[in-house]
Image (tube, grey):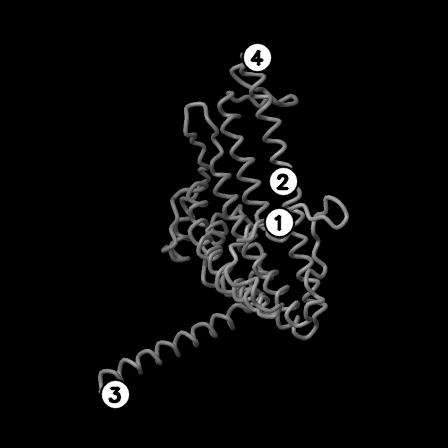
Amino acid sequence: MDTTEAASFGDIIGALGQGIVWVLQNLALSFYNFGYAVTHPASWLDWTDKAAIMRVVYYGASVEFFFVCVMVFLVIFAIGLWKRRFLWGTVVVLEGFANTIGRLFAWAGLLMVLQQVIIVFLQRIFARPDIVLGFGIPLQFDISWWSEELKLYNAMVVCLCLTYTFVQRGHVRVDLVYAAVSYRTKRIIDMLGSLFFMIPMAVMIWMFSWYFMWRSLIVPPVAPTDALDRLEMKARALRWNVETVGFSANGFTGYFLFKMLMVIMVGLIFVQAWAFFYRSYLEFVEGPEAEGKLLDLDQVETGEEPYDHAEF
């Protein structure tokens, strides 16, 4: 090994060591950051203070917030290693959260169909140019506004029922290896999939969608490269500027809601990745008899699952 190769190898080892130290430092600081946020809620929840809004914007997609999430994930897992009953309880709560939201907003599909029927009747039979709703305070929009608003219901079903469908095992699975391996190997694949696919994907999309959402809600515009002190300076000129521009003259004007749904969807995926990792670990430790334990699946009839998903 010549001098150049030795220097390169040393640089790699040095960079790796610095990276490990950086991770450990941020994990240690996450306890302080979490404690400060809990004990000083007004610093980020009191939105009468414009600087508090900017703190939410900054910390919502920050390194500090990421490591707080990692810390909570690790603390829950560490307690679960000691008391598996606690970890099972965490899994039930997280999966129940996804199920509750999904079962509620699945009704948006029915609402979408009913509204479409009403639109057709009013437009084709009664020749009405608009629809008026309200008790005392009328809510009046053009027919085209209500027609475009149907996409919001579809977005609710997609974004808010995605993790519900995952818990219900309703997603299509492209299977090349999974079915042929042993039970515990499957659980290892599930754990690795949670850590190296679901969580990184959710983090990446969150980083893009977080500022994408805020740029449609406030001015001056914010960017991922803005430091906290710069955002706090911008807070002096901050004002709400909710984007209400439609794609057509009389079309739907609430497209900022789609951006909010995107952020909520990614948050649900991130949390469900935790639950899936915890469940996979518990099923790995407890063996085949724990498969599907405490899993709240919808039933059409006793013993019949509502989803007949395909595996290739």
Distance Cα–Cα, label 1 vs label 4: 39 Å
Q: Which mark is residue 106?
A: 2
Q: Label 2 is placed on what type of residue? A: Ala
Q: Secondary structure at mark 2?
A: loop
Q: Which residue is mark 1?
A: 164
| Mark 2 or mark 4, earlier in chain | 2
Q: Which residue is mark 3?
A: 1
Q: Are marks 3 and 2 in contact (CB under 8 Å)?
A: no
Distance Cα–Cα, label 3 vs label 2: 63 Å
Q: Position of residue 296 (x, y in %)?
A: 71, 53
Q: Which residue is mark 4?
A: 125
In which quadrant is the N terminus drawn? bottom left
Tell me which residue sits at (40%, 74%) in the image: 19
Q: Are marks 1 and 3 in contact (CB under 8 Å)?
A: no
Q: Position of residue 193 (x, y in %)?
A: 52, 63
| Mark 2 or mark 1, earlier in chain | 2
Q: Label 4 is placed on what type of residue? A: Ile
Q: Quick one: label 1, few (<14), some, or many (20+) residues within 10 Å? A: many
Q: Position of residue 284 (x, y in %)?
A: 63, 70
Say which of 264 and 302 sits in front.
302
Distance Cα–Cα, label 4 vs label 3: 85 Å
Q: Label 3 is placed on what type of residue? A: Met
| Mark 4 or mark 3, earlier in chain | 3
Answer above or below: position of 245 versus 22.
Answer: above
Answer above or below: position of 250 versus 204.
Answer: above
Distance Cα–Cα, label 2 vs label 1: 10 Å
